[in-house]
Amino acid sequence: MSSVNQFYAGPLFSCSGWVAVVTGGGTGIGLMAAQALAANGAKVYITGRRQAVLEAAIKTHGTPEALGEHGGQIVPLVMDVTDKESIQKAVKVVEGQDGFLSVLINNAGMEGGRPTHGPDAGMEAYGKALFAEDPQKDWLTPYMCMTVGPYLCSAAFVHLLAAAGTKGPVKRPGNIINISSLSGLTKWSQNGQFAYNCAKAAVIQLSKLMATDLCAEEIGIRVNNLAPGYFSTELTTGTASTNGKSSWPIDEFKAEMKRVHSNADRPGTDTEMGSGILLLATNDYVNGHTLLIDGGLLLRHP
């Protein structure tokens, strides 16, 4: 007869002995993901272009006291997800130190362009504002970071994800979690946020394609997509503290929700994001799925 012990949260979500890479892991959602994995036993490489940001995050959130008695560790690793040479250097570090990868979280992101005028300014002014966006800066650079970056990182680390099937603690191939957004699911432009929303929609399609190709029996790498709603991050608040966390005073949050025509009463919490990450990372029966964590916002929007 089976024991209820198998259903305890600890064993269900244990990442003991795992090795993880989280791009854009020094702040925001990436840091939330890194904390969730590390608190449950994983060794987590947080990557980003800014060494100081990574080290500041670890100084506060990567200590043994912060990670708890079952914690693993958080390690800084400088990497630019749009630079092949930088990605290859990071792969060599993980390969040399660990030899396998349990989970890759493609999270690095940035803002896209936004027209300076909306339709209420009149069609001539609105059309000119749309046309004035810089194709490279406002469209292609964000697309490189948020869509091409996950593709390149997945390609570069895929052999280490496969190696987890023989070298990892649970002897199964690793998995990939791509971070998209509710912005990639809605038909609502969020006041002209066309470039960002298109890039995030492309991540969802990329996840479907990768999941289908990598689910082959001889590979067995799962690929899922997580689509967050409004959480307190650098992108949503425009600010970040020295420890990688952003605060969003409730009055400012509600003002932003009014601007984007939402009646959400609060942003999501770190633990709400963390539980979603752990579900996708540890549940072997979830593959090719997009998990929306938005507090029900898209129930009220197209």
Image: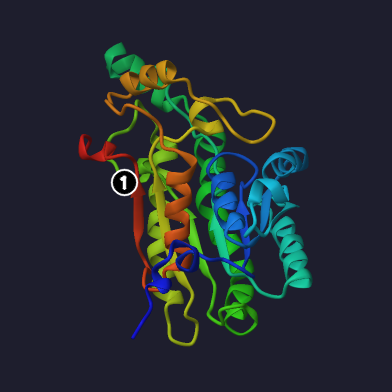
SS for callout 1: loop
Residue 196 drawn at (x, y percent): 44, 38
Which residue appears at 32% of the width and 26% of the height? 265
Observer-nearest of 208 and 177: 177
Outermost residue, top side: 121
Observer-nearest of 242 and 147: 242
- In the displayed structure, would residue 209 be above or below residue 249? below
Classify 10 Å Cα crowding around label 1: few (below 14), some (14-19), many (20 and above): some
Residue 155 drawn at (x, y percent): 58, 68
Asked which quadrant contains residue 121, the reply is: top left
Q: Quadrant of the C terminus?
A: top left
For disc 1, the marked residue is: 185
Residue 99 drawn at (x, y percent): 71, 75
- In the displayed structure, would residue 301 be above or below residue 205? above
- On the question of residue 261 being in view, the answer is yes
Asked which quadrant contains residue 141, the reply is: top right
Which residue appears at 43% of the width and 82% of the height? 216
Residue 7 drawn at (x, y percent): 39, 69
The colour scheme used here is: rainbow
- In the displayed structure, would residue 187 be above or below residue 118? below
> How many numbered circles does the render carry?
1
- On the question of residue 62 being in view, the answer is no
Q: In the figure, is residue 45 to the left or right of 128? A: right
Which residue appears at 62% of the width and 62% of the height? 41
Q: Quadrant of the N terminus?
A: bottom left
Asked which quadrant contains residue 109, the reply is: top right
What residue type is disc 1 on? Answer: Leu
